Image: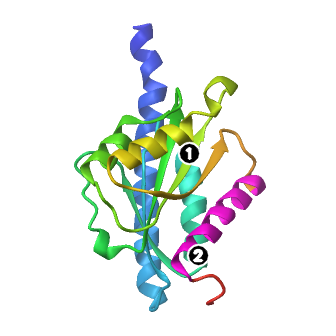
């Protein structure tokens, strides 16, 4: 009985994260149709994990991209998700990090989508204990490299980061997207 009750919060948070993803996707699809012209379309593929923090981070990221004129499509990672890369100017991968590794659905997505020729960025969230801190980005870079994908830029956001610092980190990543796509200052 206790084990079943113990799983309820995790299942509830996971389902909330998935629902939240759908809501973000719907908001940005509606907003995209109102913009008319755009800077380009960015695919955000992430795993919400078991905490609301990754979904919160993706929402802030999507809002910043939208504010800069990008159309944003948010998708949940998994092996069944095949990216039609001709539709997108860039891909942003998002994943919580556990034991210096991105979550299995993100790994499966990377394996199912080899040789992406668009700029790829990463947003890693987690606690980042000292022991693992220097391994997570090299592990992701190696994983991407095994699929013929180069990492253009990344940020790591520690769980519990305040909203202002979170927005500043996300803004820095979006600056890197702008630079990679040559759109910085074209507003």
Q: Which part of the image, by quadrant, shows the C terminus?
A: bottom right
Residue in the image at 59% along x and 52% along y: 57
Q: Nearer the viewer, residue 30 or 156?
A: 156
The percent position of residue 144, horizontal first and vertical second, equals 40, 48
Residue carrying label 2: 178
Q: Nearer the viewer, residue 77 or 152?
A: 152
Secondary structure that dominates the magenta span: helix
Residue 104 picture quarter? top left
**Boundaries of the magenta span:** 164-182
* Left or right relative to 173: residue 23: left
The percent position of residue 25, horizontal first and vertical second, equals 41, 64
Based on the picture, tell me whether residue 138 belongs to the magenta stretch.
no
In the displayed structure, would residue 29 be above or below residue 18? Answer: below
- Spatial CA distance of label 1 from label 2 is 19 Å
Secondary structure beneath label 1: strand
The percent position of residue 120, horizontal first and vertical second, equals 46, 61
Residue 51 visible in this rendered orientation of the protein? no
In the displayed structure, would residue 25 be above or below residue 155? Answer: below
Residue carrying label 1: 124
Secondary structure beneath label 2: helix
- The disc, 1 or 2, on the residue closer to the chain's N-terminal end is 1
Q: Nearer the viewer, residue 161 or 42?
A: 42
Residue 136 picture quarter? top right
Badge 2: few (under 14), some or many (20 or more) residues near its Cα, within 10 Å?
some
Residue 168 visible in this rendered orientation of the protein? yes
Badge 1: few (under 14), some or many (20 or more) residues near its Cα, within 10 Å?
many
Residue in the image at 36% along x and 51% along y: 76
């Amino acid at each position: 009985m206790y084990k079943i009750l113990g799983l309820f919060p995790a299942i509830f948070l996971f389902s909330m994260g998935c629902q939240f993803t759908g809501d973000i996707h719907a908001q940005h699809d509606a907003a995209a149709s109102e913009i008319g012209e755009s800077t380009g379309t960015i695919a955000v593929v992430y795993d919400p994990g078991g905490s609301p923090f990754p979904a919160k981070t993706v929402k802030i990221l999507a809002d910043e991209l939208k504010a800069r004129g990008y159309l944003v499509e948010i998708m949940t990672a998994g092996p069944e998700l095949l990216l039609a890369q001709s539709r997108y100017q860039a891909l942003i991968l998002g994943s919580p990090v556990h034991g210096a590794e991105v979550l299995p659905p993100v790994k499966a997505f990377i394996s199912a989508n080899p040789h992406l020729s668009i700029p790829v960025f990463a947003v890693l969230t987690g606690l980042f204990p000292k022991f693992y801190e220097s391994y997570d980005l090299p592990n992701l870079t190696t994983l991407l490299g095994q699929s013929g994908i180069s990492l253009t830029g990344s940020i790591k956001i520690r769980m519990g980061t305040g909203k202002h610092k979170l927005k500043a980190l996300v803004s820095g990543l979006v600056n890197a997207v702008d630079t990679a796509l040559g759109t910085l200052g074209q507003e």
